[in-house]
Image (cartoon, grey):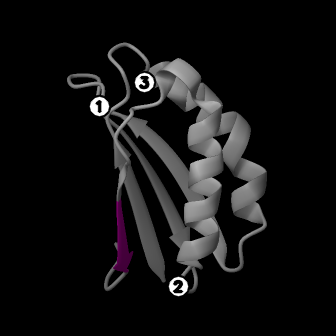
Amino acid sequence: MYMRIVRAQPAQGQADEVARKWEAFWPEKMKAQPGFRHAYFGIDRATGAVAGVTVFDQEPDAAVLNSLLEEFRATLGASNPGQPPEITLYEIAAKA
């Protein structure tokens, strides 16, 4: 299994707006990806940073997900962080 973590720092006060747009954009697109299991969106209330975590049975297609991420970023308008997000892919080595 794999987890993909996308971290970003939206404009100040925009984290909840990004969360609303994330929830409207990603669910169906993620469910269409081979091996998709779960997706979560989190907000660090102290800093306003956000993170999306997705879990897959198999290594996801980075090109497809990066293309979808760019499509999502285009929907953000004033909420767009400006800087590209940090993306990390991990193979899950253990679970509780």
Q: Look at 58% across and 82% down and name the residue there.
A: 57
Let me know if residue 47 is in the magenta part. no
- Find the residue positioned furthest to the left: 46
Residue under label 1: 44
| Residue denoted by label 2 | 59
The residue positioned 30% from the left and 33% from the top of the image is 49
Classed neighbour count for the residue bearing mark 1: other residues with Cα under 10 Å, few (<14), some (14–19), many (≥20)? few
Q: What residue is pinned by disc 3? A: 15
In the image, residue 46 sits, relative to residue 27, either above or below, namely above
Given residues 44 and 70, the one toward you in this image is 70
Which label was assigned to residue 80? none
Give amino acid for label 2: Glu
Image quadrant where one finds the C terminus: bottom left
Asked whether 7 or 73 is in front, the reply is 73
SS at mark 2 in the image: loop
Residue type, numbered disc 3: Ala
Check disc 1 and give the amino acid type.
Asp
Name the spot of residue 4 as percent of width and height, x first. 44, 66
* Label 1 – label 2 distance at C-alpha: 27 Å
Judged by its main secondary structure, the magenta piece is strand
From this view, report whether residue 30 is shown above or below residue 43: below
Q: Is residue 93 left or right of residue 19?
A: left
**Crowding near the residue tagged with mark 2, few <14, some 14–19, many ≥20 C-alpha atoms within 10 Å:** some
Q: Which residues are magenta?
A: 87-91
Q: Is residue 33 above or below residue 50?
A: below
Q: Are marks 2 and 3 in contact (CB under 8 Å)?
A: no
